[in-house]
């Protein structure tokens, strides 16, 4: 006599027990429904104790991250400081070598560790059109059972601009950036990793062209294709036009960690094919520039930052983007 009353209760238990499977799969521009289903299953297997909502968010993040990958056809280029006019207008860069003999040009950067031009030949690969978003990095940390960094400051109104979900994710340690990309790779079954330094520069220079700034035009127009010089805080990703390959924020806003160890004279000894940096070292490399600098002086495609792989804090100027180390389209 009590069976009819029990049926709704049993049905509710059944629905709660399979909430992850009851949600429709996210749409994708690149992935088949079968690939998305396989990713969903890996997430469920990896995180059986997470709520269905969190697993759904992870699935959405993985699929969107793969859709955001830009396929970059490989090629050969001359990597390093290729020179510029000794007096130039960053708003009107023209075409290298600007009517001059290349040997008469001045160095682009004052640093000497990027001056040695060397040939590099790269296989095709994929690079994210955006830097990793803060909300995605937060989700990654949550999946590992870690607390949100700087949680005590996030509700403070003066700090609100630094913690917007769409901001580039700041990382304290290079390893955190590396681990995030490997996490995407584990869940997607694609070889996701940080890009190499050569891959980053090749992409910033629109497949190795002699481009000094990685903007839509190769020149700088403050507030139009790059944050203005008087900008004193980070902005969300994708606010300005991408470079010709469709990559955003390769110039200004935040720097990118890359995979390579730093070696001061590495350019003189780098291999021709797919160089990956020295086998070991004490510093890692960041590329690009960040919001507190004067862009015309610092946002060059050839500039290298060498820094200890662990920083003092989660500075918003230090971010990353992932790559897929595969030479065919998804």
Image (cartoon, rainbow, N blue to C red):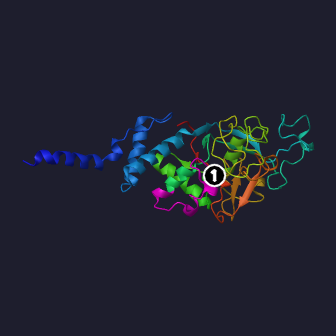
Residue 107 percent coordinates (x, y): 87, 48
Instruction: Identify the residue shown where x is 40% and y is 37%.
Output: 34
Percent x, y for residue 17? Answer: 29, 50
From this viewpoint, which residue is outermost toward the left?
1
The residue carrying mark 1 is: 161
In the displayed structure image, the side of residue 237 where residue 23 appears, left or right:
left
- In front: 284, or 134? 134
Does residue 273 appear in the picture of this structure?
Answer: no
In this view, 241 is above or below 229:
above
Q: Does the magenta-highlighted stretch encompass residue 147?
A: yes
Inspect the magenta stretch and tell me whether residue 253 lies in it.
no
* Percent position of residue 243, x then y: 70, 37
Q: Secondary structure at mark 1?
A: helix
Q: Is residue 46 left or right of residue 284?
A: left
Where residue 154 sits: x, y (%)? Answer: 57, 58
Which residue, as the protein is rendered here, is positioned at the far front?
Answer: 157
* Drawn side of residue 36 relative to residue 71, left or right: left
User: Residue 283 occupies which quadrant of the picture?
Assistant: bottom right
246 vs 117, left or right, is left
Residue 71 drawn above or below residue 57: above
| Relative depth, front residue between 244 and 156 | 156
Q: Residue at x 33, y 46 (%)?
A: 19
* Residue 59 visible from this viewpoint: yes
* Structural crowding at the residue carrying mark 1, measured as other residues with C-alpha within 10 Å and reported as few (<14), some (14–19) or many (≥20): some
The span picked out in magenta is 141-168
């Amino acid at each position: 006599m009590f069976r009819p009353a029990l049926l709704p209760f049993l049905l509710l238990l059944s629905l709660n027990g399979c909430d992850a499977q009851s949600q429709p799969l996210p749409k994708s521009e690149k992935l088949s429904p079968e690939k998305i289903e396989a990713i969903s299953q890996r997430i469920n297997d990896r995180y059986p104790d997470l709520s269905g909502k969190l697993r759904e968010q992870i699935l959405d993040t993985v699929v969107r991250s793969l859709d955001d990958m830009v396929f970059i056809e490989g090629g050969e280029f001359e990597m390093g400081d290729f020179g510029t006019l000794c007096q130039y207008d960053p708003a009107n860069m023209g075409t290298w070598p600007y009517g001059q003999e290349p040997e008469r040009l001045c160095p682009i950067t004052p640093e000497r560790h990027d001056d040695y031009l060397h040939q590099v030949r790269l296989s095709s690969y994929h690079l994210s059109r955006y830097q990793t978003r803060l909300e995605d990095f937060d989700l990654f940390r949550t999946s590992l059972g870690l607390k949100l960094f700087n949680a005590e400051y996030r509700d403070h109104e003066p700090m609100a601009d630094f913690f917007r979900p769409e901001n580039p994710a700041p990382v304290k340690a290079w390893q955190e950036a590396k681990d995030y990309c490997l996490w995407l790779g584990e869940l997607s079954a694609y070889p996701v990793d940080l890009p190499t330094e050569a891959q980053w520069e090749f992409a910033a220079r629109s497949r190795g062209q002699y481009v000094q700034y990685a903007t839509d035009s190769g020149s700088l127009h403050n507030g139009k294709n790059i944050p203005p010089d008087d900008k004193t805080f980070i902005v969300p990703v994708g606010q300005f036009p991408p470079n010709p390959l469709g990559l955003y924020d390769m110039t200004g806003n935040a720097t990118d960690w890359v995979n390579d160890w730093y070696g001061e004279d590495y350019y003189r000894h780098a291999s021709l094919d797919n160089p990956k940096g020295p086998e070991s070292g004490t510093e890692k490399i960041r590329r690009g520039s960040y919001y507190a600098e004067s862009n015309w002086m610092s946002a060059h495609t050839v500039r290298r930052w060498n820094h200890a792989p662990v920083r003092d804090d989660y500075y918003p100027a230090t971010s990353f983007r992932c790559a897929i180390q595969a030479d065919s389209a998804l």
